[in-house]
Amino acid sequence: LSSLGGNTINSSTGAVTFSATWSGNTTITASASGCNGPKTVTHTVTVTPTVGTPAFVLGSSSTRCQAANAVIYTANATNTTGITYSLDATSLSRGNTINPFTGEVTFDANWSGVSTITASAAGCNGPKTANHSVTTTASVGIPVFALGATTTRCQGNGNVIYSATASNSTSLTYSLDATSLSAGNTINASNGRVNYASGWVGTAIITATATGCSSTASASHSAITTGSITTPIFDLGTSSTRCQGAATVGYNATSTNATSIIYSLNAASLSGGNTINSSTGEVTFTSGWTGTSIVTATANGCNGPLASTHTITIIPSVGTPVFSLGLTSIRCQAAGSVFYTATASNNTGISYSMDVASILAGNTINATTGEVTYAAGWSGTTQITVTAQGCNGPKSTVHNATTNQPVQAPIFTLGANSTRCQGAGGVNYSATALNSTSISYSLDATSLGAGNTINSSTGVVTFVAGWSGNSTVTASAAGCSGPLTSTHAITTTPTVGNPIFAMGSTSSRCIAAGNVTYSATATNNTGISYILDNTSLSNGNTINSNTGEVTFDVNWSGVSIITVTATGCNGPKTATHTVTTNLAVLTPVFGLGASSIRCQGAGANVYSATATNTTGIVYTLDAISLSGGNTINASTGSVTFVAGWTGNSTVTA
């Protein structure tokens, strides 16, 4: 069979030449010649066929619609020992996977494009490969209208093309809703052109249907046909009136089929500070605006715009009434009539009224003229109220008319007269007066000339330090039947002086029983009294408190203090006198005795002496010794002798 298959062998060498197409078993027989020969042996060679190129069951290419699913791409190959499958890198990177043993490809839901499946057949002279291209076609997209989801048109004959596009579509068809068709509108199913009937108003729904990979997708367009607008009509009509004042008022208008209404305000109103909301028609008026305002409403829409106006007349606010006599007035008690007239701007009427208390007391008022007729015995406050009618009214004002009783003479708080002590200071000489409207004060010219002053409103007099004498304060009470005056007399008493003893501030006396008068004087005093210190009193001494006479005890010695007190304005004032009572001095005793002897010669000897109760010792030298040239120190008793002196010298202490 091998020979028949075109294979040959070299019989000498055993080299077999195989035919390219041969496959199967080849048996080579070796025959050895020799004794007992020939001997043979065989060798079998199995030649395996070449593996064939894989062939896909679905061919070299296929298509599929985009979706998440699995497809088996099986391939066959002759003489293969096994087939494995792989997927291109792009497809793998997009989430697709392949079973390498079965060729099953699992596609991702979002995948579209070309995938390449490679089948690799193993075997002799292999491996052999083949590719299968799978085109995944994207799903058809939802149609998108060139005019968007909705459009608006005005009523009337006309053609409008509502074209749409859809990704991955193979065709687009258009349809129109049944209501629109029944009203006489038509549509071209191929291009979406709608022919509108002249009377059509409403919403037409155009549906575009796209056909694509094993599916369809639809979208709708709403075409609104709007009727013609009408002229705006204001809710408040063509005109209105309002009272002056800050406020926001809505001037709404309506218009059939209008797409919007825009509001505007006349230039004069705007320059006056008023504003308008252009969307709502709300006008915000300033507090001071009066006159005419015009609101214009402009309606937009089919066959528009159309406009209309609303005229507003702003009436000024009634003014607050103003009395010609002001807010208050004063009259004196008596029977009589008084007109309390008032005016008010922009009023539609003025009326007058009076408080109940005044009416009950017999007073009357004319409600039309404001004339009040007073009863003779009336006093007090009458309230006249005027009321003005008008826009933002009524407005009222009250006038208080006070009817006063006759003023009475002032009465000083301190009475008709008073006294004070001399000195700088202020004293209040206030007075009261029944029914007075005010009290003013004045001071006599003499007091003013001396530098004193008065507060004319309070009656406080400020006195200068040196003033003494009489002052007169006059109080003048103003009021009905006035003014009436009264006076207050003030006596300013001088300040008591400091006491001065006739004997001065000190004196001395010798111990002995006796009387001594220590009198003192003080200017402007109202009385003088004397006292003696306690030590002197306890040792038997006494004093006459009226005269200052001191009676000394026979045994008293020491210091006595007499105090004098002077009473009077800005007092009391005191002074003291100190009396020293001394013991009797005793005879001096020389330290050298009554006599002494010295030798002639120049020199100094001290002849000092002592004496009980002395207040001082003075020394003298006899005349003969002095004439002899000797000298003595009168304070110390030191005698300076001259060289030639002899004889007797007498030193006297």
Image (spheres, grey):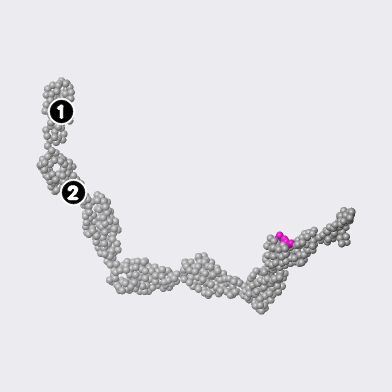
Give me the residue at 14% from left, 23% from top: 598
Q: Secondary structure at mark 1?
A: loop
Give me the residue at 85% from left, 59% from top: 27
Residue corresponding to mark 2? 566
Residue corresponding to mark 1? 607
Please tell me how many numbered marks the rendered image carries. Answer: 2
Give me the residue at 23% from left, 54% from top: 471
Classify 520 as above or below 111: above
Name which residue type carries label 1: Tyr
Residue 416: % across, % down: 22, 59
Range covered by the magenta-colored residues:
84-90
Q: Are marks 2 and 1 in contact (CB under 8 Å)?
A: no
Name the residue at the bottom extreme: 182
Classify 121 as above or below 550: below
Q: Give the side of residue 425 with respect to residue 73, left or right.
A: left
Quadrant position of the N terminus in the picture: bottom right
Location of residue 358 by image quarter? bottom left
Quadrant position of the C terminus in the picture: top left
- 583 in magenta: no
Name the residue at the top extreme: 644
Residue 110: % across, % down: 67, 65
Q: Which mark is first along the chain, 1 or 2?
A: 2
